[in-house]
Image (cartoon, helix red, strand yellow):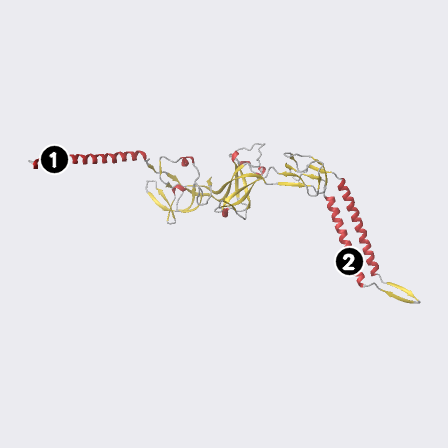
Amino acid sequence: MKMKILNGIKTLMKKKISKILLAVVLCGVAAVLVGGALKSDSEPALETRLATVERGDLTVDITAAGNLALSVEEDLAFEIAGAVEEIMVEEGDSVEEGQLLATLDTAEWDEELSALERGLLQAEINLDNAKLSLENAEEETTTTFTGGIWGTTTDPKEIDIKELEVEMAELRLTDAQKALDEARDASPEIIAPFAGFITKVYVEGGDEVLKGTLAVQLADPSKFEADILVSEMDIFQVKLGGEAMVQADAMRELSFPAEVTHIAPTATIQSGVVNYEVKVELQPLEAVQQEQMPTTIPEDFQLREGLTVTVSIVVAQRNDVLLVPNGAITTQAWQIYVQVMSPDGVIEERSITTGIRNWQYTEVTDGLSEGEKVIMAQETTSTSTASQQGQRPSGGFMQGMGHID
């Protein structure tokens, strides 16, 4: 009787355990199914994108920000000493070439000229006297005494002294003439050497000034330059005379051609970052062909000192070359490949030879033909915002930005 009861209990327990295990298994299966469903919903499907190999112009440039500065500024100084009689201009005034800007009282200058003229006359007299003295010393004299003739000659040392006195008198005459010529060439007036505008006025009427005292500063409003910092990775690609473009942030529709005019021989190091200062000079507006501008320049348009600008220095350029998007290129063991899709849908992995590249395109020198289709790197349908907006990535083969025309 006891055995039957025990067997019954065991049977009931086995049935309960089986039900529990079955429930656990069912739950696990359901979890897997639900997880798979959720995963398939959350992961977007991959799509294949094709790009066509095309011909075009490729430019690689180094881009940096800077500020415009006037490239031609000249300090005009008084050429003689005296009292300032009048200043005819103020800061900001526009002036023409040859315009009178400032004058000195000429009373002191006239006195100086008179003194120099008297000094020149005295130097001429001194030279004549020295020459006469030398002639007398060199002249042989004779004296008659009791019917005889005595010949006398001058001591040779005395003749040497007389010759030296003549040489010194000639030098003094030369110096006096030079001083008078310089004084006559100097002017009590300051004349504008070129058309521009006054940026600074250093003196006022009535001031006593010395020779070389600055009067005004004149700038040419048509000539500008910009300084930028180029990294140590890029500086070796920058060359004097290199082509550049300058775009003012406030007028992005206009770009101005420029030229690299200076590369600093020493580095600028800040917080361990090594850069080199590079100067570019803009071409004058009148020298820029109108067709080079994307929009018409207003007649009263004028660049201004201090404007924030973006400078692009061209370091490489290729025209009418085969181009492929960077996203289609893969590199394996120093070999460059693309996947080419034939018209019948067959995909071929092909090795290619490349040239320069910028942030978007790569020049292909061998391995592809114009019109062929290449497969871009696979992307999900939920493309990132940066890709949609076409933002330029950092880094790159040439360590600089670029564009395709």
- Calculate the distance from the C-alpha at mark 1 to the C-alpha at mark 2: 148 Å
Residue occupied by mark 1: 9
Q: Residue furthest left?
A: 1
Residue occupied by mark 2: 164
Label 2: element kind: helix
Q: How many marks?
A: 2
Asked where in the image residue 281 lies, by quadrant, the reply is top right
403 to the left or right of 283: left
Circle 2 crowding by C-alpha within 10 Å: few under 14, some 14–19, many from 20: some
Residue in the picture at 7% in, 36% down: 2
Which of the two residues, 228 or 207, is positioned nearer the viewer here?
Answer: 207
30 to the left or right of 2: right
- Compared to 24, does 365 lie above or below? below
Which of the two residues, 4 or 342, is positioned nearer the viewer here?
Answer: 4
Q: Label 1 sits on what residue type?
A: Ile
Which of the two residues, 141 or 164, is positioned nearer the viewer here?
Answer: 164
Q: Are marks 1 and 2 in contact (CB under 8 Å)?
A: no
In x, y percent, where is residue 361? 43, 42
Q: Label 2 sits on what residue type?
A: Leu
Question: Which label number is shown at residue 357?
Answer: none
Q: Residue furthest front?
A: 2
In x, y percent, where is residue 231? 49, 45
Circle 1 crowding by C-alpha within 10 Å: few under 14, some 14–19, many from 20: few
Q: Nearer the viewer, mark 1 or mark 2?
A: 1
Residue in the picture at 73% in, 46% down: 182
Label 1: element kind: helix
* Quadrant containing the N terminus in the rendered view: top left
Which of the two residues, 39 or 349, is positioned nearer the viewer here?
Answer: 39
In x, y percent, where is residue 152? 86, 64
In x, y percent, where is residue 155? 82, 63
